[in-house]
């Protein structure tokens, strides 16, 4: 039986921290579905199809499927028949929020497990919000996001 997990997020934009979590998840799971959340509540810089394309370019292999969803994560996992959610943690503050979410998801469907992965030490400080802010002021984001994402950010903020 194929081991499949969902790694959900807004990925606005995809960072090297996200890339690292996906790569490490592939050591555990046969397939990782990167679920790009298309929630309008977050007012993303990039449209969902752009964010999907960023992940697809970074992970062209068949073991990574990229999809978008706009639903409760538990409902999305059920619709994909996936019982494992992977979440990345950077700091204690992430853990507090993610623990609440994992417990709520368990309350909604106790057959779905959440696995937490710590980001690499080099990425503890990186968040998509911070990347967007630095890029908006023309700051150097090389080494923080994949090159194709950095180029898209530069183009977005050129005007």
Image (cartoon, rainbow, N blue to C red):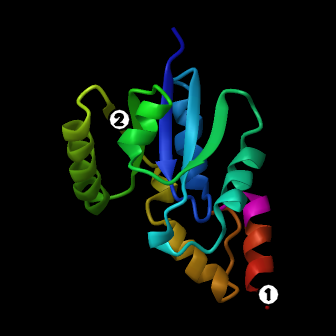
Locate residue 134: give its quadrant. Answer: bottom right
Residue sitting at 72 percent across and 27 percent down?
62
Q: Which mark is residue 115?
A: 2
Q: Is residue 101 left or right of residue 119?
A: left
Quadrant in which the C terminus appears: bottom right
Separation of residues labelled 2 and 1 (CA atoms)? 39 Å
Q: Which residue is at a point 33% across and 36% down the rendered structure image?
A: 114
Whether residue 117 is visible here, answered yes or no, is no
Tell me where residue 28 appears, x and y as whole percent: 49, 23
- Identify which residue, 20 or 70, lies in the foreground: 70
Residue 90 visible (yes or no):
yes
Query: Which disc, if any, is residue 107?
Result: none
Residue 157: x %, y % from top left: 73, 84
Q: Residues within 10 Å of mark 1 (few under 14, many from 20)?
A: few
Q: Earlier in the sequence, mark 2 or mark 1?
A: 2
Instruction: Provide residue 109's location: percent of width, then percent of height.
Output: 26, 33
Residue at mark 1:
158
Identify the residue at image location x=65%, y=85%: 136
Rendered location of residue 110, percent (x, y): 23, 30
* Residue beneath the point at 77% across and 37% down: 60
User: Which residues are the magenta region?
Assistant: 145-149
Nearest to the observer: residue 142 or residue 73: 73
On screen, residue 61 above or below 57:
above
Q: Quadrant of residue 85?
A: top left
- Most prominent secondary structure in the magenta stretch? helix
């Amino acid at each position: 039986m194929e081991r499949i997990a969902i790694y959900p997020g807004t990925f606005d934009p995809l960072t090297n921290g996200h890339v690292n979590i996906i790569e490490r998840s592939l050591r555990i799971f046969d397939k990782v579905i990167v679920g790009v959340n298309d929630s309008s509540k977050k007012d993303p810089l990039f449209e969902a199809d752009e964010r999907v394309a960023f992940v697809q370019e970074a992970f062209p292999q068949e073991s990574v499927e990229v999809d978008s969803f706009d639903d409760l994560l538990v409902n999305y996992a059920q619709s994909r028949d996936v019982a494992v959610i992977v979440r990345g943690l950077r700091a204690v503050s992430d853990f507090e929020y993610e623990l609440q979410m994992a417990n709520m998801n368990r309350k909604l469907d106790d057959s779905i497990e959440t696995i937490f992965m710590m980001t690499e030490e080099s990425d503890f400080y990186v968040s998509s919000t911070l990347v967007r802010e630095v890029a908006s002021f023309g700051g150097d984001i090389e080494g923080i996001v994949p090159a194709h994402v950095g180029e898209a950010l530069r183009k977005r903020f050129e005007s």
